[in-house]
Image: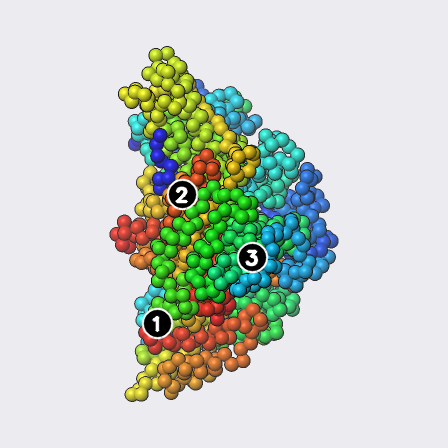
């Protein structure tokens, strides 16, 4: 067996990406391509009373203007693609197809719409009473008694705003029909899900749709479900009987593909003089749209993050005239960790206890929500190693006591956590006559390093060098895999590829052992070591043969191994011991706050994480750093602002919606705490896509408090809030 | 004069596809020969699909391709397209070392058209088709004759094709308000008939078929579209194509010298200065300029002078390291 | 984007003669093309002036500088004469936009930069600046970025330029030429307050082309500095900014002369001349600067979300001067 897994190998797709050769959805083309541009509603609530398309249709180059009035009937398993009822501002109401992008864009502007407008509600506070319970509130022990017995209390409302994912690659779909067969080049976090969604929408078999997306220009959750524009592109392609390319504009992306909903969180912590939690309440409300229900599971952390016998936890939704929210990097944990980790810091300050010490006193050795052990949990090591590297011991707990030059210095920390998801996934590993290996799996690489780690996993499992492996993903015709969300891909696809590759090696060995006068005659799979393209007998190391030689001997052009990785009983699916599987980490940051102007600069960051087996140190560290950068954005910058009167977002651009730029980001130190987890998945890894953002905003807020004494409980912490 | 020039006989070689044939055995039918750098390419299935588009050019009914996943060939309805790795002598004979190339060979075995370029610079299928059409006319074949002949055309794929079916395929319809403009991109002139509204960015991506330059916001707010115009970095989404006439535009596709990457490209790979890769071409073009400007001296300076390029994946640490290292490799600056 | 006729002007005269109803001069395009993509600007003709020979920076007799209208922002900031003699201008430009935008943006274009008000940018909202008479959405709306000085009931948008704040402090003179010939417009008379006509940003007549910006000489003793406060550490518009200049002299050192202009607070770069006068004769101390800052913000008024700007602007002024005092400028 090789040991390529874990090595910090460069990304195998690096060369394609640095030369501009990597192709993203909108960059695929087809003969007679046409361009589609959406028309979006300009009011938030009401109905379309008239649509005048005559001017648009007269524009040069226009091929079709498709509206609710003339759209073809496609299978309406879901709601119609265009609706005259307006549910939010920025809703798709028509599409224009033209020869060129410029013509389509102009004609779309000239679709004149008359509305009967009603007063919208887009802000939570004025209508907070209309929030409704979603799911059963969770009650453990006796919260009231626990709180009554507490000598120290933290009781506040915490808020997080609407945030937009804003991947750099705008959503795009290129739809190409060939008879009743649809090929869609679709920017998606799930080629299979996108294909299924399109098949349902058009009432055709799943085998009639092929979704291709070799490179995804970032997703972060907003490419996790199939949004209307993909179906609209396919519908338009049917109407004009030509391939259609539909790419959303950056502004359209603020209302067409979800956002992180704003949250209002009522958190109460009660503790005794010893700092032990006696009561923990977390009630959260997030907005959702008129048509969908999306729960940002903000409060679920309360049941398990810290040890506490008396817990109240619940989740409410509030319907507003807004686009449907969706998953955004660490849905639930990112928003929930902001309030809990801030509240813990407040409690620590109240008690005069070090924030890490307080967390250790309330350390949850098991998952108290389910009463299960953790399959692994290295949080204590994360605290210890993170604190050591950061120099936490140098922190003077007195608020405002530390300075550097003119700046106030603050140290802050928080815990991080995210579930280790693992979902059923299939993969195939094919050896060709030359001894090379093709790995096929219908997963996708959002920039997380999937191509690279799958190659490493296959290289080890088959026993070849990584450059002998070619990974094919991003195509719904490949073996089925789940969408890349919930940090599951490395675990799920990694496990499937490992099993398929093992099956391939076994098959090759067994077939070869059975050939006439085979040097490996009488050998079983486990008797043969495969390494760097060579099979060697463990019984007699002098006996060895190259894979290519074996294939020649076998006379095969190809051999393949297939496997489906499935979670087993240990995840609660059957008899035996059940575990909670979760990644943990600790975030430490230093902020510098201008004493007068109150601009905040994150000066240092240390994040320590325990995430099971490391598949590729380089891509893993990058992913975690990316999460922290998101945390910096969430903590200091990001907020989508609705105008209450018109029910419309006012800052739908990258100039006005601030994501971090290079100058906002310090050097981030990531510690990977060694962790072995026998249960989490065959490959032994936990995902890393989301955990990096969790706790990060709280760590920044806690550091700002330490520097300034200002406690900000609503994100983002812009300078006006600490003036 | 190299061996594989237009008008010359295509250098012969073993097809090595198990058929024991040589290229010359294919005479009697036109052939298309494609060379692609032997780099790992995850977009393989898609590339086959693109390739099938070229095949479709030979006959009316499209939908030729069923990609066989289990072997080293691409299977169409009536033929298998072998893929193999040629020896260096073959590459040399065709002048295709480190390049991607496409040759159209007529039924007599004569090279009628070729495109040899750096990896990532894709030929437009329209150009290929036009050449085939020209061959047809030159030989006085009727369209029907041609289709019959062409249907039996052989396709030889050498390594993996990097063939783009980029917009060249879109019919170059007469755009209203169309004006003639010639854009010089990576040293090559592209004559376009375009609407005055077209930006340099859309000219590159949607007209010329060079999609390496990315559209992230289309409003000068993200830097993904950064190119060099007369050597200076600029947001190509903010410049009208008409404005850029006569100026030298350098894109990400023009940075590497053949197979040899630019030091900034190398450094981005080494330091993992990207994740999804979408902002990367803009980051790299910006970094090249940043270094030439002399703004890559310290980490703080790099951060400030690279802040016009947003990376939503948050690969900024790697980017700063990459720029720093490339700056040193390029001898400070200038 | 609405279709338009594109014309490249071969000379200043041709550019001016080509101007017609609905035409616009096209410089770097970083704002005009941006606004055209949003249908906020819909010119019927673009007269591309970028090839005109107006890209030089020349010394004026007496120690001033003449900046050609087509000098790119990057080149202006990097010019050693600007850096040495008008430091705040160099700093202001480098605090704006991004390197690649500054490579496109021109001096003349920067003067013509329109507000970043989100309501102005989105044609779905009422906006008096874009559509006179439709109402101001910002006054009752999301106005965190908006004006606190010189605004009207019709408009509370701010001028987003950094460069213009420095030009205002430096008493720049805008050289224009139009159908009726040449004229010079002092910077403080170039931009307008919104009043009842917020649709007009400047006093430039139709068909008038900016061909240069003159910087009068600044006494060597006057040190200048620009401070910008923004949400991001780079590539963001100002919440507030201050361009200040100061000459401290005498045996018992006092302020002999001062310059103060503010950005991010008004429909035009806001020169605070009363506050400047208040500084003369005062010692260069935090207290003096704070006193002047109070003067500068006299009459300032917030609209809820931007209330903080009143205090922030004062602190920005103090900081800019203090940087000069402590040598951090």
Q: Nearer the viewer, residue B330 or A674?
A: A674
Mark 1 vs mark 2, foreground winner is 2
Above or below, comparing residue A14 to residue B140 in the picture: below
Q: Which residue is found at the position 34% from the left and 72% from the top?
A: C328
Mark 2, chain letter? A
Q: Which mark is residue C198?
A: none
Q: Secondary structure at mark 3?
A: strand
Tell me the SS state at disc 2: loop
Q: Which residue is mark 2?
A: A675
At x 35%, y 30%, the residue is: A1
Q: Position of residue B215 (x, y in %)?
A: 48, 49
Q: Chain of mark 3?
A: A
Residue mark closest to the camera, 3 vs 1: 3
**3 and 1 marks in contact (CB < 8 Å):** no
Q: Secondary structure at mark 1?
A: loop
Q: Is residue B162 above or below residue C174?
A: above
The vertical placement of A540 against C238, above or below, is above
Give the chain letter at badge 1: C
> Which residue corresponds to the image point at 51% horizontal and 65% vertical from the top-left?
A712
Of the numbered discs in the image, which one, if any, rests on residue C329?
1
Q: Is residue A516 left or right of residue B178?
A: left
Q: Position of residue B239 (x, y in %)?
A: 46, 54
Q: Which residue is mark 3?
A: A280
* Residue C172 in the image, given as x and y percentages of width and height: 42, 74
Closest to the camera, between mark 3 and mark 2, is 3
Instruction: Give percent across and percent down for residue A333.
Output: 52, 51
Q: CA distance from mark 1 to mark 2?
A: 50 Å
């Amino acid at each position: 067996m090789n040991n390529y897994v874990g090595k910090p190998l460069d990304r195998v797709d690096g060369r394609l990406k640095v030369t501009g050769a990597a192709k993203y959805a909108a960059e695929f083309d087809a003969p007679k391509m046409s361009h589609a541009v959406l028309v979006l509603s300009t009011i938030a609530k009401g109905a379309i009373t008239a649509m005048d398309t005559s001017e648009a249709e007269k524009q040069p180059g226009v091929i079709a203007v498709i509206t609710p009035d003339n759209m073809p009937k496609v299978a309406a398993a879901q709601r119609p693609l265009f609706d005259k009822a307006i549910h939010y501002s920025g809703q798709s109401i028509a599409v224009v197809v033209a020869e060129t992008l410029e013509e389509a864009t102009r004609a779309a502007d000239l679709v004149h719409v008359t509305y009967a407008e009603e007063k919208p509600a887009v802000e939570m506070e004025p209508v907070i009473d209309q929030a409704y319970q979603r799911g059963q509130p969770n009650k453990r022990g006796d919260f009231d008694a626990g709180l009554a017995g507490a000598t120290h209390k933290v009781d506040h409302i915490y808020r997080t705003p609407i945030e937009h994912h804003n991947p750099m690659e705008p959503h795009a779909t290129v739809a190409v029909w060939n008879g009743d067969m649809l090929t869609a080049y679709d920017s998606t976090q799930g080629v299979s899900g996108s294909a299924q969604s399109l098949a349902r929408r058009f009432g055709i078999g799943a085998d009639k749709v092929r979704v291709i997306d070799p490179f995804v220009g970032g997703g972060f959750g907003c490419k996790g479900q199939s949004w209307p524009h993909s179906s609209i592109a396919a519908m338009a392609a049917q109407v004009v009987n030509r391939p259609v390319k539909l790419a959303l504009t950056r502004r359209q992306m603020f209302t067409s593909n979800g956002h992180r909903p704003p949250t209002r969180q009522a958190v109460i912590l009660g503790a005794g003089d010893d700092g032990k939690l006696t009561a923990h309440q977390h009630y959260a409300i997030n907005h959702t749209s008129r048509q969908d229900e999306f729960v940002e599971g903000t409060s679920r952390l309360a049941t398990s993050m810290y040890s506490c016998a008396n817990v109240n936890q619940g989740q409410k939704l509030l319907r507003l005239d807004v686009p449907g929210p969706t998953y955004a990097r660490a849905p639930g944990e990112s928003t929930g960790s902001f309030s809990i980790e801030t509240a813990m810091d407040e409690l620590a300050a109240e008690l005069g206890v070090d924030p890490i010490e307080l967390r250790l006193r309330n350390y949850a050795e098991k998952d108290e929500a389910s009463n299960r052990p953790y399959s692994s949990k290295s949080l204590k090591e994360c605290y210890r190693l993170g604190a050591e590297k950061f120099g936490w011991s140098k922190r003077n707990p007195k608020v405002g006591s530390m300075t550097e030059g003119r700046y106030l210095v603050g140290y802050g920390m928080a815990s991080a956590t995210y579930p280790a998801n693992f979902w059923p996934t299939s993969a195939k590993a094919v050896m060709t006559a030359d001894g090379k290996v093709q790995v096929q799996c219908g997963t996708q690489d959002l920039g997380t390093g999937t191509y690279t780690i799958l190659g490493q996993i296959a290289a080890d499992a088959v026993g070849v060098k990584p450059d002998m492996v070619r990974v094919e993903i991003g195509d719904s015709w490949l073996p089925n895999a789940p969408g890349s969300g919930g940090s599951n891909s490395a675990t799920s696809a990694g496990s499937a590829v490992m099993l398929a590759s093992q099956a391939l090696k076994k098959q090759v060995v067994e077939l070869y052992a059975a050939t006439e006068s085979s040097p490996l005659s009488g050998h079983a799979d486990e008797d043969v070591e495969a390494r760097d393209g060579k099979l060697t007998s463990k019984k007699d190391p002098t006996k060895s043969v190259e894979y290519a030689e074996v294939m020649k001997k076998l006379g095969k052009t190809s051999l393949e191994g297939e496997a489906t990785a499935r979670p087993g009983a240990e995840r609660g699916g059957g008899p035996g011991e059940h575990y909670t599987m979760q990644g943990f980490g600790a975030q430490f940051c230093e902020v510098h706050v201008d004493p007068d102007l109150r601009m905040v600069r994150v000066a240092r960051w240390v994040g320590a994480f325990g995430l099971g087996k490391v598949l590729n140190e380089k891509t893993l560290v990058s992913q975690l750093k990316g999460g922290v950068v998101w945390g910096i954005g969430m903590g200091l910058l990001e907020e989508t602002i609705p105008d209450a009167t018109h029910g419309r977002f006012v800052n739908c651009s990258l100039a006005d919606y601030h994501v971090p730029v290079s100058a906002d980001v310090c050097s981030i130190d990531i510690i990977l705490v060694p962790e072995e987890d026998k249960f989490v998945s065959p490959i032994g890894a936990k995902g890393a896509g989301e955990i990096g953002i969790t706790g990060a905003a709280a760590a920044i807020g806690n550091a700002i408090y330490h520097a300034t004494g200002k406690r900000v409980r609503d994100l983002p912490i812009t300078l006006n809030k600490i003036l | 004069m190299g061996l594989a020039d237009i008008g010359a006989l295509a250098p012969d070689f073993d097809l090595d596809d198990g058929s024991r044939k040589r290229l010359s055995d294919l005479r009697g039918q036109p052939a298309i020969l494609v060379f692609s750098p032997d780099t790992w390419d995850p977009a393989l299935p898609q590339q086959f699909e693109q390739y099938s588009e070229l095949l479709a050019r030979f006959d009316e009914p499209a939908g030729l391709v069923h990609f066989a996943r289990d072997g080293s060939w691409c299977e169409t309805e009536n033929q298998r397209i072998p893929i193999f790795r040629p020896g260096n002598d073959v590459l040399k004979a065709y002048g295709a070392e480190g390049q991607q190339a496409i040759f159209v060979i007529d039924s007599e075995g004569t090279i009628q058209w070729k495109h040899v370029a750096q990896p990532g610079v894709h030929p437009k299928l329209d150009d290929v088709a036009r050449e085939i059409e020209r061959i047809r006319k030159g030989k006085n074949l009727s369209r029907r004759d041609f289709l019959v002949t062409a249907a039996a055309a052989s396709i030889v794929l050498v390594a993996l094709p990097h063939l783009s079916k980029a917009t060249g395929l879109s019919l170059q319809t007469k755009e209203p308000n169309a004006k003639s403009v010639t854009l010089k991109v990576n040293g090559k002139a592209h004559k376009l008939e375009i609407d005055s509204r077209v930006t340099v960015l859309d000219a590159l991506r949607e007209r010329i078929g060079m999609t390496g330059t990315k559209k992230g916001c289309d409003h000068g707010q993200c830097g993904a579209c950064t190119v060099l115009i007369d050597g200076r970095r600029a947001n190509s989404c903010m410049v009208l194509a008409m404005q850029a006439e006569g100026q030298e535009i350098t894109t990400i596709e023009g940075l590497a010298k053949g197979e040899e990457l630019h030091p900034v490209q190398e450094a981005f790979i080494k330091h993992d200065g990207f994740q999804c890769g979408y902002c990367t071409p803009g980051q790299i073009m910006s970094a090249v300029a940043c270094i030439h400007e002399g703004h890559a001296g310290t980490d703080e300076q790099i951060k400030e002078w690279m802040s016009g390029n947003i990376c939503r994946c948050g690969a900024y640490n790697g980017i700063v390291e990459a720029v720093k290292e490339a700056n040193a490799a390029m001898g400070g600056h200038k | 984007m609405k279709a338009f006729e594109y014309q490249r002007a071969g000379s200043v005269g041709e550019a001016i003669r080509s101007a017609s109803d609905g035409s616009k001069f096209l410089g770097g395009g970083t704002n005009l093309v941006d606004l055209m993509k949003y249908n906020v600007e819909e010119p019927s003709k673009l007269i591309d002036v970028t090839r005109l020979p107006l890209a030089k920076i020349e010394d004026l007799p007496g120690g001033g500088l003449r900046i050609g209208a087509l000098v790119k922002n990057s080149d202006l900031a990097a010019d050693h004469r600007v850096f040495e003699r008008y430091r705040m201008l160099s700093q202001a430009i480098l605090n704006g936009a991004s390197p690649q935008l500054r490579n496109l943006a021109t001096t003349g274009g920067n003067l013509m930069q329109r507000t970043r008000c989100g309501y102005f940018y989105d044609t779905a909202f009422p906006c008096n600046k874009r559509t006179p008479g439709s109402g101001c959405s910002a006054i009752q709306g999301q106005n965190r970025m908006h004006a606190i000085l010189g605004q009207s009931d019709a408009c509370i948008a701010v001028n987003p330029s950094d460069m213009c704040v420095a030009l205002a402090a430096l008493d720049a003179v805008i050289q224009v030429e139009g159908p009726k010939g040449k004229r010079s417009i002092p910077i403080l008379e170039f931009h307008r307050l919104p009043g009842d006509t917020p649709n007009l940003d400047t006093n430039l007549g139709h068909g008038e082309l900016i061909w240069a910006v003159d910087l009068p000489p600044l006494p060597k003793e006057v040190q200048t500095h620009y401070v910008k406060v923004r949400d991001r550490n780079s590539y963001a518009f100002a919440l507030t900014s201050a361009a200040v200049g100061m000459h401290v002299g005498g045996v018992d050192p006092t302020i002999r002369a001062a310059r103060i202009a503010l950005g991010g607070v008004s429909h035009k770069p806001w020169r605070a001349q009363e506050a400047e006068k208040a500084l003369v004769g005062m010692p260069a101390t935090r207290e003096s600067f704070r006193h002047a800052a109070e003067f500068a913000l006299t009459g300032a008024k917030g609209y809820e979300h931007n209330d903080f700007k009143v205090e922030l602007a004062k602190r920005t002024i103090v900081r800019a001067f203090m940087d000069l005092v402590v040598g951090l400028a």
